[in-house]
Image (cartoon, rainbow, N blue to C red):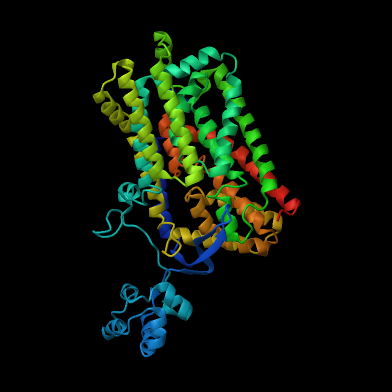
Amino acid sequence: MAKTKRDLTKMKTPHTYVIIFVVVVFAWLLTFLVPAGKFSTEDVEYQDANGDTKTRTVLKQETFRYDYNLDKEFVYDQLTDLVQQPAELAELGVDQEALEAVLDEGEKKLDQAQLDEVNLTDDTLYDMYGDKIYDKSEKLHKTAKVWGTDDFGGFGFLNFIFEGLVSGDKYGSAVGIAALILVVGGAFGIIMRTGAIDAGIYAFISKTKGLERLAIPLLFFAFSFGGATFGMAEEVIPFSMVMVPFVIALGYDSIVAVTVTYVASQVGNAASWMSPFSVAVAQGIAGVPVLSGAGFRLIMWFVITGLSAAYLSIYAERIRKNPLKSEVYESDDYFRHHIQKTAEEKKPFLLGHKLILLEMLAVLIWIVWGVTQKGYYIPEIASQFFVMGLAAGILAVIFKLDDMGINDIAKSFQSGAAELAGTAIVVGMAKGILLVLGGSEPTMPSALNTILHSIGGLLNGVPAMIGAWVMYIFQSLFNLVVTSNSGQAALTMPIMAPLADLVGVSRQIAVLAYQLGAGFVDAFTPVSASLIGVLGVARIEWAKWAKFQIKMQGFFFVLGSIFIFIAIAIGLQ
């Protein structure tokens, strides 16, 4: 019998959940091979973009040590001497009687948990006695169990979804962004129910035939500017609610919509000359004057944004001419159906629709003002979008748009939030990867800290050009796991800045390698909560997104490498 050939073009791409689970298992297996390590930290002061003094907790790269068991004999002997020195105990903030009670239990019962309770932490002991406090006969691994919780047996990697979802706080990943996604989804559920966006898009397109090609580069520059100036990222999620159906209505696909919004914002972030969340923090930690090198970066931003917009325009034009070439043609049917239905029904663009769109514009301006001028973040943005959705619903009831009633406002909020519930779960799942690796806290033993230290050490003694390029590669790879710009700066810049001195390049170039790597890869990694949120809005599976984005990441990498080499050639300081 003749064997039937398998058509590889018809193979199903893995679901985002499947991809993340595979990564979680890989991360878990990695912790069996990589021993856990940790750093001590210190607070450093730096000047922000406004000239104000800020404080940031960063790791001390020379304090890296593997996780070892306590050398009980040595520590017990030292503390027996220390307990007789009241003045030194007072300086350390250690209660003499409490320490005596610990020592009375004997050397064998001594452990770090007891010492933590009397304010003799691992960092304090390490500062006093160095690595003599450890029994270095065995490097310890921080490997999660298969199943378990903090209360029963310790964290198990099969609990990564729940632990990921409840990690963080309302100001960030994962719980804050997951909540933001649900609120924004509910708000736009109300707005979409009013029909204002559909009617507005149809009215706009019918009056601007032939100008579609101008929209892509103009929008790309606009969102890139947002990323460059105020670190636009999570803010793109609600914007994409409007932009996805708009861009599809112009004849493109949802990949174009995500690229012209979220990817553009990350291009701006990568090439920024003033972002307070990346450039300012990294320069402050590296000891480089804040906003120095702005002229070089401004030119870089314009060139990279322009070339990236051209790259997207070529892809967009190919899709406009033949929509079937799109990887997301089938999933885009959801949006095309709504657009086609509006066009066939020829719904009039009523006063109520116009007022809702004006109200949306006013709230968007309020959000941009709040973020840039008042420092609004996730809690405020969520509240602002709820106000937007509620006001739109009330206007729809007043003007009887699509016969909407009060109950319809509640139902549409529920359905809108439900549509993005799966995306909110992905945010938690992605955060779970970091938890399985032991977390990103430099003071807590983890495989991630060991990897960070090891790769940093590899750069010693390499030529300047190679060293700077490897820094860029490292920052790009590190951002696959740690996507917070300020968080990555706090973890990597204390190591990369002095390494730049050793390999003979300026610290300004170390900052450049960081911002290019951190910015570009945010548009690709499934760990990015903001990206996953935008993909959820656009109904794009990450695997399909990756097929398109991996090529663009190659394009970004070439651009980033070129500007790293140019910076070295001109001696950027």
- Which quarter of the picture shows residue 3? top left
Q: Who is closer to the viewer here, 284 or 266? A: 284
Q: Residue at x 38, y 47 (%)?
A: 174
Horizontal relation, residue 378 to residue 504: left or right: left
**Which quadrant, please, contains the N terminus?**
top left
Can residue 447 be seen in this snapshot?
yes
Q: From the viewer's perspective, is 103 left or right of 267?
A: left
Q: Is residue 395 above or below residue 372?
A: above
Number of dots carrying numbers = 0
Where does residue 523 sit, x and y in percent of width and height? Answer: 52, 40
Whether 1 is drawn above or below 471: the answer is above
Rendered location of residue 513, percent (x, y):
62, 51
Q: Nearer the viewer, residue 571 or 433?
A: 571
User: Residue, x 34% and y 57% (percent of image)?
Assistant: 144
Measured along the vertical axis of the image, is residue 465 above or below residue 89?
Answer: above
Quadrant housing residue 414: top left
Quadrant location, the C terminus: bottom right
Asked whether 215 or 318 is in front, the reply is 215
For the point 46% across and 80% down, the residue is 128
Q: Is residue 12 visible?
A: no
Given residues 493 and 228, the one toward you in this image is 228
Q: Where is residue 434 shown, x and y percent of the image?
A: 41, 52
